[in-house]
Image (tube, rainbow, N blue to C red):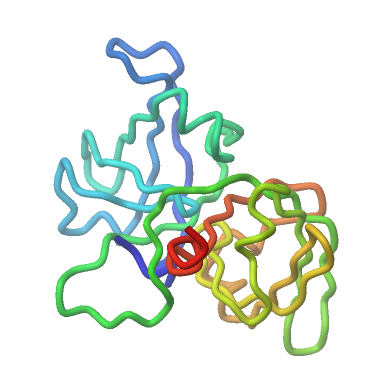
Amino acid sequence: MFTGIVEGIGKVEKISKNTKNRSAIQMTVNLGKHAKGLKIGQSVALNGVCLTATKLSKSNCIFEMIEETTKKTDLGNLKVGGIVNIERSLKAGDRLEGHFVLGHVDGVGIIKKILKKPKEVQVWFEVPKKLAKYVVKKGSIAVDGISLTVVDIKKNLASVSLIPHTIEVTNFQTKKVGDKVNIETDILGKYILK
């Protein structure tokens, strides 16, 4: 379980599609200081996708992905040198400063507009139609694993506003119109609708 409070960014060092086991892709990510204390088998959210650490070497970590992960998220589109958001899993007793994020991405959205204002950046993205009913104005949403508040909704478009700090510590420093983002709607809203 995660909270959507991104701890920092990592860099994709290697992508292997010819793996010796049953995983579709092995991806090596330099987690930097966020690798400290990480153990094999633990969960890390990369761009909001819960992955398992399968091999560690200093600050590099190998994550394996099955075909379902590469199809349902934007991780299959990553390239060597790409920047990913990092969040280590929540420990019992930690503060819940964002919202409940499982790392189970519901779908992929596309950035449609980026409005840079003096003290914030507003980002409009297209939400897959099947997810639109779960996106609530002033509700929580995880975009590439970042816990954000929905500012506005227009049909299947939603907007969020980012403060400068969020841009500095996340992959949004490199995002542009047309880029894909992982969307996880609020788990509480999904259960209420169900």
The residue that appears at 61% across and 33% down in the rendered structure is 77
Residue 158, x across and y down, in percent: 75, 66
Q: Is residue 13 above or below residue 3?
A: above
Q: How many marks?
A: 0
Residue 44, x across and y down, in percent: 32, 52
The residue that appears at 66% across and 60% down in the rendered structure is 133
Q: Is residue 159 above or below residue 12?
A: below
> As drawn, which residue projects farthest toward the front?
194
Residue 36, x across and y down, in percent: 20, 58
Horizontal relation, residue 140 to residue 89: left or right: right
Residue 164, x across and y down, in percent: 64, 81
Q: Looking at this view, is 15 or 122 the one in front?
A: 122
Q: Looking at this view, is 133 or 108 the one in front?
A: 133
Horizontal relation, residue 103 to residue 115: left or right: left
In the rendered image, which quarter is residue 150 located in? bottom right
The residue that appears at 28% across and 48% down in the rendered structure is 59
